[in-house]
Amino acid sequence: MAHLLMNTLEIFWVLFLSVSALQSGPANRWPPIEPIDRKYRFSSMEEAKLKTVILGENGESLYILECYSFGTVPKTGEFMYSGDFECRLHSSDNRDHESTLLTELTNADADWESRGRFLSEQLVAPCGDYKNLGRTRSFRLRGFRLDLKLSNVVFDESQRSFSQMAPALKSFNMELVVTSDPSAKSAVTAMPNLPDRDGLPEPCRKAFDTLYLKQFDHRAVHEHAKP
């Protein structure tokens, strides 16, 4: 009887550990990354492009970040880059369900549904000062945090932007920072803190409409970055 009870307890314990592993699996399955802190200067939109690899601690290629201006987009047909400048993140094996891991939408049905796409009207004052929507955007996923920070943004008043809503981008600096973040457990970008859409100035509300704010309204945090 004691032997049977012991076997029952062992089976229960194995099942408990199995269930616990399944529940905690997604939080622990992402391999740790090697940090990145790089600065880029794009003196013209013809130079605004980059492709960089995010490595694991063991040196293995885990993710690839690709950024292009509308004029430097490679004609591969793999991803529909749009906007004045756009960044895409994907696994090195390119087996992701989503076309870019920078989206917060697990059911995204268009490549542009990502805060990785920068439009000129989102970068002009005061819109560019709003955190996660303007010149500085953070993405938390898969055990790390990726920050894109645009600065020294210059506009070309003689040309219109991709959407025709603002002057075209002429040049800018960008800092790419990738750091470990064990609290980032989602497979795609976690929901960021966003300003209340109704509290935005009308020009910015219109500029940010392409960032699907309406889908975030019920979860938005009433905060915004101060200029």
Image (tube, rainbow, N blue to C red):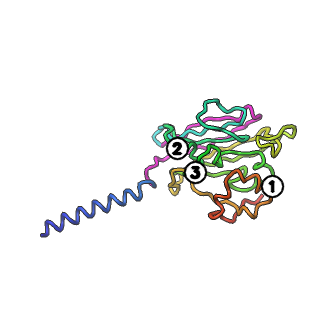
Mark sitting earlier along the chain (2/3):
2
Q: Which mark is residue 34?
A: 2
Identify the residue position indicated by label 1 in the image.
203
Q: Is residue 88 left or right of residue 226?
A: left
Residue 99 placement: quadrant: top right
- The single residue placed furthest to the front in the displayed view is 109
* Residue 184 x, y percent position in the rendering: 53, 55
Instruction: List x then y, in percent, for residue 172.
Output: 75, 41
In screen coordinates, is 41 left or right of 3? right
29 and 173: which is toward the camera: 29
Q: Quadrant of the C terminus?
A: bottom right
Nearer the camera: disc 3 or disc 1:
1
Q: Observer-nearest residue: 90 or 43? A: 90
Determine the secondary structure under disc 1.
helix
For the point 65% across and 49% down, the residue is 115
Q: Is residue 73 above or below residue 197?
A: above
Q: Nearer the viewer, mark 2 or mark 3?
A: 3
Q: Label 2: state its secondary structure.
A: loop
Distance between mark 1 and mark 2 Cα atoms: 39 Å
**Element under disc 3:** strand
Magenta region includes residue 105: no
Res. 145 mark: 3
Highlighted range, magenta: 27-56
Q: Position of residue 80 (x, y in %)?
A: 64, 38
Residue 1 is left or right of residue 167, and the answer is left
Disc 2 versus disc 3: distance between alpha carbons? Answer: 11 Å
Characterize the local packing of mark 1: few (<14), some (14-19) or many (20 or more) Cα atoms within 10 angstroms.
Answer: some
Residue 26 vs residue 145, the one in the foreground: 26
Kind of residue indicated by mark 2:
Glu
Q: Residue lying furthest bottom in this view?
A: 1
The amino acid marked with disc number 1 is Pro
